[in-house]
Image (cartoon, rainbow, N blue to C red):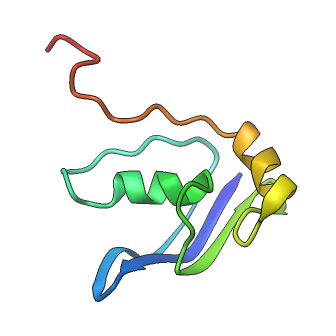
Amino acid sequence: MLNITALTKSFGQNAAAHRVTFDLPISAMIGRSGAGKSTLLRMMNGLTIATSGQIVFEEQTATGLTGAALRGWQAQCAMIFQQFNLVRH
């Protein structure tokens, strides 16, 4: 189970994700361009540090990890970066 609690990422005065909270057994995200999907995914896999909030997956807290612990977390995560030319249509 993935638990996201009040996760926020701000860039100056702009919030890319604001107090996002959800629990889900599987993950799929859809939404319009600029909605914060990529920012949320980057926070979940440790590529972007959350401004506030907490990420817990199967009782392991991912927010605040550094060094070897962060690299270990990232080794267990997968992300396909957005490229519009991956599919012909």
In the picture provided, is 64 more to the left or to the right than 24?
right
From this viewpoint, which residue is outermost toward the left?
89
Identity of the residue drawn at 33% across and 35% down: 82
Q: Position of residue 26 (x, y in %)?
A: 59, 41
Q: How many marks?
A: 0
Query: Where residue 35 sits in the image (x, y, percent)?
Result: 26, 60
User: Horizontal and vertical percent for residue 31?
Assistant: 26, 50
In this rendering, the answer to whether 25 lies above or below 65 is above
- In this view, the residue farthest toward the front is 67
Residue at image coords 54%, 60%: 43
Which corner quadrant holds the C terminus? top left
Residue furthest to the bottom in view is 13
Q: Position of residue 9 (x, y in %)?
A: 44, 75
Q: Residue at x 32, y 45 (%)?
A: 30
Q: Is 17 placed left or right of 80 in the picture?
A: left
Judge from the rendering whether residue 50 lies leftward or rightward of residue 86; answer left or right: right
Question: What residue lies at 58% left-to-right and 56% top-to-bottom?
Answer: 44
- The relative height of residue 9 versus residue 75 in the rendered view (above or below) is below
Tell me if residue 60 comes above or below residue 25 in the rendering: below
Quarter assignment of residue 70: bottom right
Q: Residue 55 sits in which quadrant?
A: bottom right
